[in-house]
Amino acid sequence: MIEYLKELFIGYGLSERLSVFLSYTIAVLMVTALCVITMVVIKKLLLRMLRVYIAKSKNKWDDIFLKNKVFERIASILPAIIIHESAVLFRGVEVWIKRVAFTYIVFAVLMALYKILDSVDDIYRQHDISRARPIKGYLQVVKIFFTIAAAIIAVSALMDRSPLILLSGLGAATAVLMLIFQNSILGLVASIQLATNNMVQIGDWIEMSSHGADGEVIEITLHTVKVQNWDKTIVTIPPHALISESFKNWKGMQESGSRRIKRCIYIDMNSIRFCDEEMLIRLKKIQYLKEYIEERSAEIERYNKEKGIDPSSIFNGRHMTNIGTFRVYIQRYLEHHPSINHNMTTMVRQLQPGEHGLPIEIYAFANTTQWVD
């Protein structure tokens, strides 16, 4: 076509140089117009028809492909193919046009593959198993592999050399590549260990004070584990840090359906004393204590009689105390409370006295894991 246009312009009396320039200019404009028309037809007609079809389709995966613009990425390859095939029109630079166009095609395909992998991850996240076995980190490894392969193919095309020659040269650069992809390799190994040992999943509440993390895991990737703290800040932790360092996972508490209550009530030491008859009569009116006081009083009276103890002095024999009775009251109160999980440990005990008094520790489990409750 270039020769035809050249002869045509020369026939009209134009100089040979001007005829060649005009011929190449028209050829470039024609190829450009063909590319523009192709993209307009694809975007205005084919992609619009595709959107209508996908909107009526019952499948969900095609909606995700459309949302992530997979089809637009694939369509962007066509102009490069047109330019590649039109290179024969430009004899002087045909080789370089084909090389550059082929390089663009390679990276356009790479971008389309990126979008496809992102869509695969989005589709996978719609299933419950994605919380226990996220695949985003593995897809990032696949992206790295595709990127390296695309770079080798593109460089080979520009240099007009076999990709095998470049691959053979990579052996000498292994140490450099290991240094470059050190974090990726560590992240991949850590991700596999985290998934295999079921150490952390998306949605788990983890606490890692060394990295300022105390919240819910929202994303696990090749290089980072994102944790949204309860104050809505987001902390990123390297996956290998979860392997090499210690962290607390509250998943066991969440799965048990119960949450521990461990609190102390401090009693003034000066208020602790033996229970006299008047106090016992008053305490018997408390429903939780009536049975206990009767049984305990009978037991103590029987013991004192067996040992021949003179009960006229409070310092002789065994007697009930107000602190011991108070501890039993709390124990009975918890045992009858509807919000306590009675299948788990329920305990009320005295701890070592301190500057704030005598601690009475409540150790029990609520039958809910809701924070506010």
Image: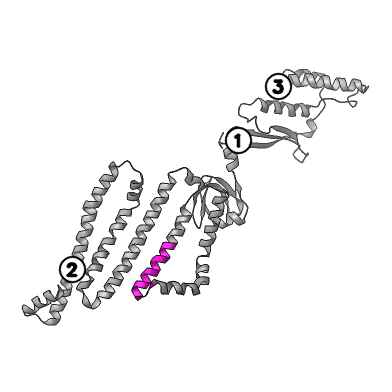
Element under disc 3: helix
Front disc: 1 or 3? 1
- In the displayed structure, 367 sits above or below 5; it is above
Instruction: Kindly identify the amino acid type of the residue bearing the numbered disc 3.
Output: Tyr
The reply to whether residue 283 is visible in this rendering is no
Relative to residue 254, is residue 228 depicted above or below?
Answer: below
Q: Residue 371: image x %, image y %?
A: 56, 37
Characterize the magenta stretch by its predominant secondary structure.
helix
Query: Residue lying farthest left?
Result: 12
Q: Which residue is drawn at 44% across and 71% down?
A: 167
Instruction: Compare marks 2 and 3 and give the one earlier in the sequence.
Output: 2
- Residues at marks 1 and 3, CA–CA distance in whole angstroms: 25 Å
Q: Which residue type carries mark 1?
A: Ser
Mark 3 residue crowding within 10 angstroms, few (<14) / some (14–19) / many (20+) = some
Viewer-proximal residue, 298 or 360?
298
Residue positioned 41% across, 74% down in the render:
165
Residue shown at 19% from the left, 63% from the top = 34
Residue 151, x across and y down, in percent: 39, 68
Q: Which residue bears the numbered disc 1?
A: 258
Name the residue carrying label 3: 288
Q: What stretch is highlighted in magenta?
A: 145-162
Q: Which colour scheme is used?
A: one colour
In the rendered view, does 301 fall on the left or right side of 359? right
Q: Is residue 155 magenta?
A: yes
Q: Residue 29 carries which label?
A: 2
Q: Dividing the image into 4 quarters, which one contains the C terminus?
A: top right
Q: Does the magenta stretch include residue 101?
A: no
x and y, in percent, of residue 289 in the image: 73, 21
